[in-house]
Image (spheres, helix red, strand yellow):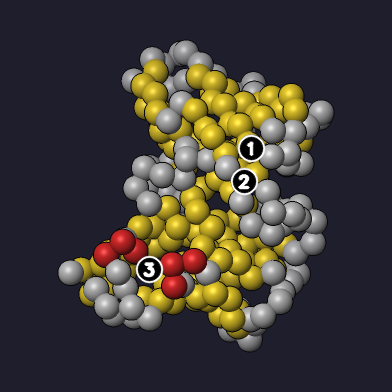
Amino acid sequence: AQSVTQLGSHVSVSEGALVLLRCNYSSSVPPYLFWYVQYPNQGLQLLLKYTSAATLVKGINGFEAEFKKSETSFHLTKPSAHMSDAAEYFCAVSNSGGYQKVTFGTGTKLQVIP
Amino acid sequence: SAVISQKPSRDICQRGTSLTIQCQVDSQVTMMFWYRQQPGQSLTLIATANQGSEATYESGFVIDKFPISRPNLTFSTLTVSNMSPEDSSIYLCSANTQGKNDGYTFGSGTRLTVV
């Protein structure tokens, strides 16, 4: 079985401040890990993915995440928050190899304060 | 990357009726997925749809309630049958358009309200 836990359902940061959204995973086999963003009234957009290559993954819109096996973590960061980053962020996991279903975390709503 | 067109984007339906949601992908994909996102919650997988075979449903979801069609490699439909207010949710389709398990593209979702 696989799962992800997102710590903090709501996170508030000031514009220009560091964004840190936490995700811990559980998987009995090497995982593939994803971060998705959902803007209001829209579908999900893939931000970045870890698929067993480099542990530091860079995504779109200046976001990056680091896979840490020892900590079973895949936290999402951005050095400087922008107002347009306000959205809900979902961490997700699937088993590596072949087509596999994806299990989503409960989501973290990011608020950016001007 | 591929684009998934999903419609309708929203609907308000009477209880006891059915709604069919359509997803069209602009390239051929092997597997499509249907998710439900209840208000304020995460995504829950309803079923996986392969072309030419019956959909595979997750625990808690049944074909009679959520029949799925997958007539070809670019199209799928999900029907929400005999609706009740508890079915009010956002329904999203997804497909793997970048190769094996390499990131999934989502439709823009259907916001369903049952009254």
For mark 2, name the chain: B
The residue positioned 75% from the left and 64% from the top of the image is: A96
Secondary structure type for disc 3: loop
Which residue bears the numbered disc 2?
Answer: B2
- Image label count: 3
For mark 3, name the chain: A
Residue A74 is marked as: none
Horizontal and vertical percent position of residue A24: 54, 73
Which residue bears the numbered disc 3?
Answer: A8
The amino acid on which the numbered mark 3 sits, given as a three-letter code, is Gly
Between B82 and A14, the residue placed more toward the observer is A14
Residue B26 is marked as: 1
Quarter holding residue B15: top left
The amino acid on which the numbered mark 2 sits, given as a three-letter code, is Ala
Between A91 and B1, the residue placed more toward the observer is B1
Q: Is residue B105 above or below residue A58?
A: above
The Cα atoms of the two marked residues, 3 and 2, are separated by 32 Å
Image marks 2 and 1: residues in contact by CB distance under 8 Å: yes
Q: In this view, does A44 lie above or below B48?
A: below
Is disc 1 surrounded by few (<14), some (14 to 19) or many (20+) residues within 10 Å? Answer: some
Earlier in the chain: of badge 2 and badge 1, it is 2
User: Does residue B99 appear in the picture of this structure?
Assistant: yes
Horizontal and vertical percent position of residue A48: 56, 66
Horizontal and vertical percent position of residue B115: 34, 20
For mark 1, name the chain: B
Secondary structure type for disc 2: loop
The residue positioned 69% from the left and 33% from the top of the image is: B74
